[in-house]
Amino acid sequence: DGGITQSPKYLFRKEGQNVTLSCEQNLNHDAMYWYRQDPGQGLRLIYYSQIVNDFQKGDIAEGYSVSREKKESFPLTVTSAQKNPTAFYLCASSIFGTWYNEQFFGPGTRLTVL
Amino acid sequence: AQTVTQSQPEMSVQEAETVTLSCTYDTSESDYYLFWYKQPPSRQMILVIRQEAYKQQNATENRFSVNFQKAAKSFSLKISDSQLGDAAMYFCAYASSGDKLTFGTGTRLAVRP
């Protein structure tokens, strides 16, 4: 079945540690996205990549980094510079990089900083 | 930046009844797209319905329909014959060719059996 997978489902981090969230898609989509979801705030865009080997900052990129070396993979690293990283993280993809295309979402990763 | 407002944090509906979720947006564009996404308890978001602003006809998908009022910048979602599986968080979203997908803060819908 085609879809988006995210791992792990739950992640615990000590303060000062970097962690990497995995996102893989087998939909052959060009574009991939990372969102952060906090209670009462909807989804906020962290980074996006409209084509392999290229990515752009979203609205809240500070303290995060990404790479897009393969079309199917778009890992997100939460660095120690991110001041409040506890949140739910959603990865998405769309067939093309135009914003009005339907985005398909993964099941998410819940990150908790201890 | 475009804004999307959902003024109803929570709604409740009796099973088999109809409920309408509200959404307003702000834009200076004439051509854009509006979406309703559903986030069930599993938290994996799925697209419910999409409306293109240049189309006057309201979009429908089975029990889901929208009331798109372009002049009023309003985009409400009507769920008919509500089912227990409709219980979820619903997000209204906006995008255009030049503007990223922007989400509202969501409406949590409860369905009473």
Image (cartoon, rainbow, N blue to C red):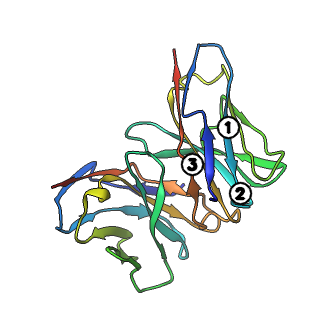
Q: Quadrant of the N terminus of chain B?
A: bottom right
Q: Which residue is mark 2?
A: A31
Relative to B77, is A46 above or below? above
Amino acid, disc 3: Gly
- The residue that appears at 43% across and 86% down in the rendered structure is B56
Q: Which residue is mark 3?
A: A106
Q: Determine the secondary structure under disc 3.
A: loop
Amino acid, disc 2: Ala
Q: CA distance from mark 3 to mark 2?
A: 14 Å
- Crowd rating for badge 2 (residues with CA inside 10 Å; few <14, some 14–19, many 20+): many
Q: Is residue B10 visible?
A: yes
**Badge 3 and badge 2 in a common chain:** yes
Q: Determine the secondary structure under disc 1.
A: strand
Residue A47 left/right relative to B7: right
> On residue A22, which mark appears?
1
Q: Position of residue B14 (x, y in %)?
A: 15, 60
Q: Nearer the viewer, residue B87 or A102?
A: B87
Q: Position of residue A73 (x, y in %)?
A: 74, 46
Q: Earlier in the sequence, mark 2 or mark 1?
A: 1
Q: Quadrant of the C terminus of chain B?
A: bottom left
Which label lies toward us, 2 or 1? 1
Q: Earlier in the sequence, mark 1 or mark 3?
A: 1
> On residue B11, which mark appears?
none
Quarter of the rendering containing residue A27 = bottom right
- The residue that appears at 45% across and 36% down in the rendered structure is A38
Residue at the far front in the pictured view = A1
Q: Position of residue A32 (x, y in %)?
A: 68, 52
